[in-house]
Amino acid sequence: MTTAPPRVLTIAGSDSGGGAGIQADLRTFFACGVHGCVALTAVTVQNSLGVTGIAEIPAETVAAQVVSVAEDIGLHAAKTGMLASARIIEAVTPALDRVGIGRNGTTPFVVDPVSASMHGDQLLADSALDALRGLLFPRATLVTPNLDEVRLITGIAVKDREDQRLAAKALHELGPEWVLVKGGHMWDDPECLDLLYDGREFIELPGPRYDTKHTHGSGDTLASSISSALAHGATVPEAVRFGKDFIVKSVAAAYPLGSGDGPVSPFWRLDR
Ligand code: PLP
């Protein structure tokens, strides 16, 4: 018998095409040497062209999954992906507090504020933004918005590096310990600069920009690799540097699938 690896919980939705959502999370967890647990929030009917249907899981069932795995299996980190609705966020919040996930407890908590897919399909109801800001942000060890999510959450339309710093400050005021403002959507920036901020210092994480449309699941893969590193005991800056390297290599290894956009791939790590 060997000992169990660190355990990471994803509170997120399913992508039937296997590119994003819990499928991307579990693939990344495996490649990062952690055991993945799932609190499923929604089933999406999805392929490489987009989302054509969503069935939400009952909010109390989402919350019960969190408590069930945390109390028996034990967790070393948790992350969110698609949360679908205010109802689900409101039900999950007391479950997080009960099992010590987030800043009120001891388990690091990465909030990826997923709002829409790369095709523009809505994955979080507009009415859930207040719950995301008011309930999850203050509990987060780290939040990882892309620039579309930054605009929805803060109203700031980031166009350059200066705006990116302003947005990081505005997001930090909502209560997370650390903020990572991802620069991937700043298309006229030749670099893909992510900005990490803890209320005191800015850490710039530059990276190459690849000319590819196969980036489905990139946000999920980044947040999952960061969460895995936190579960292994890394500090937040160490975990984010690990995640940045992980996502750059996973975008480079992305493959086409179907007639639309293919997923980023963590398979490169299995060759090691
Ligand atoms: N579908 C689900 C279920 C997701 O959780 C996500 C992202 O979190 C997406 C789709 C969107 O992925 P992308 O924007 O990479 O297409």
Image (cartoon, grey):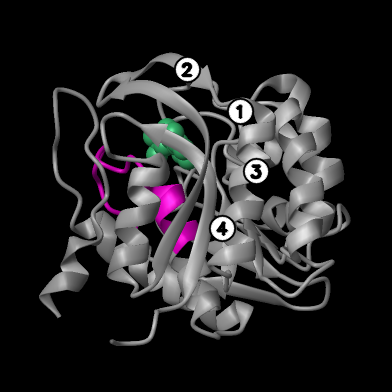
Identify which amino acid the numbered label 1 is placed on: Ala
Query: Mark 4 and 1 residues: CB-CB less than 8 Å, in contact?
Result: no
Q: Which mark is residue 69?
A: 4
Find out whether residue 214 is within the magenta segment: yes
What amino acid does circle 3 point to? Ala
Of pointers 2 and 3, the one earlier in the residue sequence: 2
In primary-sequence order, the first of circles 1 and 3 is 3
At label 4, which amino acid type do we have? Answer: Val
Identify the residue under disc 2. Answer: 54
> Which SS class for mark 3?
helix
Mark toward the start of the polypeptide (2 vs 4): 2
Residue 111 is one of the magenta-drawn residues? no
**Kind of element beneath mark 4:** helix
Residue 131: image location, x then y, percent: 81, 35
The tag on residue 64 is 3
- Residue 53 in the image: x percent, y percent? 42, 13
Q: Answer with left or right where residue 183 lies relative to residue 125.
A: left
> Could you tell me which quadrant the C terminus lies in?
bottom left
> Could you tell me if residue 183 is visible in this image?
yes
Q: Mark 1 or mark 3: which is in front?
A: 3
Kind of residue indicated by mark 2? Ile
Who comes first in sequence, dot 1 or dot 2? 2
Mark 4 residue's CB less than 8 Å from ligand 1: no
Image spot of residue 261 (x, y percent): 24, 31
Which residue is the site of mark 1?
84
Rendering coords of residue 4 (x, y %): 39, 80
> Real-space Cα distance between discs 4 and 1?
21 Å
**Quadrant of picture, ligand 1:** top left
